[in-house]
Image (cartoon, rainbow, N blue to C red):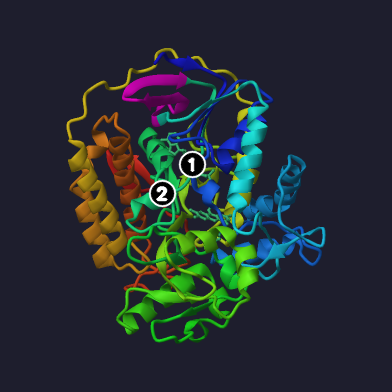
Amino acid sequence: MQDLKTDFIVVGGGVAGLRAAIELSRHGDVIVLTKDVLTEGSTEYAQGGVAVALNYDDEVAIHFEDTIKAGDGLCRHDAVNILVKEGPDRILELIDWGAEFDKEDSKLAFTIEAAHSRKRILHAKGDSTGKEIMRVLVDKIKTLKNVKKMSFNTAVDLIVQDNICYGVVVCKENSIFKILGRATIIATGGAGQVYSRTTNPDVCTGDGIAMALRAGAILEDMEFVQFHPTVLYAPNTPSFLLSEAMRGEGAIIRDVNGDAFMQRYHPKAELAPRDVVSRAIISQMVETKSDHVYLDLTHLNPEFLKKRFPRIYSTCLGYNLDITKQMVPISPAAHYLMGGIKTDIDGATNIKGLYSAGESACTGVHGANRLASNSLLEGLVFGFRCAVHASGLEPLNPTTVTDFDNAKETISRSDINTIRNHIKKTMWEYVGIIRCGKSLSQAKQEISRWKDIMDMPFRSRIGIETKNIICVAMAITESALCREGSVGAHYRTDFKERGENWQRHISVKLIDKEIKTCI
Ligand code: FAD
Ligand code: SIN
C-alpha cells in the first residue's frame, strides 16, 4: 500500500467517529479507518437506548444531577454540563437526518433505566437503538464525497514527533503504510476484550488507548470499568446482553432459589446503580454457591415483551430460551470503560493534533460510574465537538517521518492466542468486579511476564490487538492498585471506604517504557 495524505484521519467508525467525520467533512478531506466492516463496533449492538432530556417532565438540570450522582463524586462538571445541554440538539439533528426512535401515540416514547430519576431513554425498534443510529450516520456519510471509508484497515501506531501527531501507521493484509493528516481523531471504542467475559464485540481491544499511551498521551480514570449485571450465562452461548431497559420495564433478578434479593441490597432494588447490582449478584452467587442468577420476565405480558425487546427475544429463542416463559440465567460481564485517553472538553489530548471521542476518550463525563445510556449521547456530543476544534488546526509539515519498524513477527499465532487468553482470564479473576491489593499485585506480576511484547512489531490483527490488550490491562491494573479506596465501579475489599484524597483522578503515562501513575 502507498502512503496517503489527507486533512483529517478518524480512527473508528462507531457513533463518535462517524459524528466527528460528518462535521470534519465540512472543512476538508477525511479518511475513516475501521478494523472490520464499517458497522462493527459497540454502537451497532447498543440496545437500551440513548439518554436525553427531551421528555415533557424532564430538564437538562435533572439529567445533570442524575449523571453526577451515578458518577459517585468523580464526574467533571463542565463536561457533564456540555453533555446534557448539547445532547438535545445532537438528537434532534439525528431525527432530522432520518432516525426513527420509537413512539407512543405519535410522541417520542421514553423509558427508564437504573439511576435515572425520569423517563428519558429514547429507543429504536425496541432494543436496536445503536443499529438505528448507525444506519442514519452511515447513510449520511455515504452522501459526503470527501469522506473516504477504509474498512479492514487496522491502525497500528501514531506518528508523533516533538509532541505533535502527524498521523497513523496502518496495517492492511500484513502490509504497512502511513496516513498523514493535520488532525487524528481516535474513536476506537472501549476495551471490554481485555476481560474474558464481556458484552463488547471483538473489535473492542482498546487499540486507540494503547496507541495513544505509546505515543506519550495521558490516560485517566482507567481503574473504573463498568460491569453490566445482566448478561446471558448459559453453556455454548455468547455473553449476550439483556438490556437494563428490561428491568426498567419490570424484570426481576432472582437467585437460584427464586429469591428476589435486590431489595435487601439497595432501596431501588433492580434499578440501583449498575455497580451495586453487579456486586449484589456476585455476593448472592457466593452465598448460594452458584455461578449464575436469573432474570425473570415471566410475569410480564408476553406480547409486550416480544414487541418491546424483539432482538433479545429472538436471540434468546435461538439458544432455546423463551424469555416469556423461562427465567434467563445471567451473570455480570465487563461492559464499559469510564477511563481512557485524557481529553479536554473539546476532545484535545496532551499531544498537539491528537484528539479522542467516544468510549476511547476520558472527558470525565462519567466519573467513577457511567449513567446508563449516556454513552451514545457522549459519542454524538463529543464526536461533534472534537471535529469543530480539530477543524481549526493549520496543516502540518513534518520534516521527516520515522519509518515503521519492518521487523517480522517473532511469536507464533497460537502462542499469541494463548497469551491473550491468559491475560483476559487474569484480568477477569484479579482485576474484576471485586478487587484487593493482593489480587491486583498478582495480576500485575502475571501481565508483566509479557511486557516485552509491548516493544514488538506486529502485522497480524491478533498480534496487534494482543499487544494493545497487554498495554490496557497494565494501565487498568496500575490505576486500580494506586486507588486505595472504593469509589463507583472500583471496589476493593481491602479499602472498602473511599479512602484519603479520593476525589483525585488517577492518570498513567508511559515513562521509560513503564506504565506509571502521574497524579
Ligand atoms: P464503537 O462503536 O465501539 O466503534 C469503535 C470503532 O473503532 C469500530 O469501527 C472499530 O472497527 C474501530 N477500531 C477499533 N480499533 C481499531 C484500529 N486499531 N484500527 C482501526 N479501527 C479500529 N450505550 C448507550 O448509551 N446505550 C445503550 O443502550 C448501550 N448498549 C450497549 C450494548 C452493548 C452490547 C454494548 C457492548 C455497549 C452498549 N453501550 C450502550 C455502550 C455504547 O454502545 C458504546 O460506549 C459506544 O457505542 C461506543 O461508541 P464508539 O464510537 O466510541 O466506539
Ligand atoms: C443496556 O441496554 O442495558 C445497555 C445500556 C448502556 O450500557 O448504557
Compared with 166, 431 (above or below) is: below
Residue where numbered disc 1 is placed: 40
Which x, y percent locates residue 63? 69, 62
Compared with 157, 497 (above or below) is: below
Residue where numbered disc 2 is placed: 191
437 horizontally vs 350: left or right: left
Task: Specify whether residue 73 is in view.
Answer: no
Instruction: Tell which circle, 1 or 2, labels the residue nearer the N-terminal end.
Output: 1
Q: Is residue 478 magenta?
A: no
Residue depicted at x 38% and y 33%: 215
Which contiguous range is marked in magenta? Answer: 155-179
Q: Residues within 10 Å of mark 1 (few under 14, many from 20)?
A: many
Which x, y percent locates residue 517? 36, 50
Per the model, the C-alpha gap separating discs 1 and 2 is 14 Å
Residue depicted at x 33% and y 67%: 435
Report the predominant secondary structure element of the magenta stretch.
strand
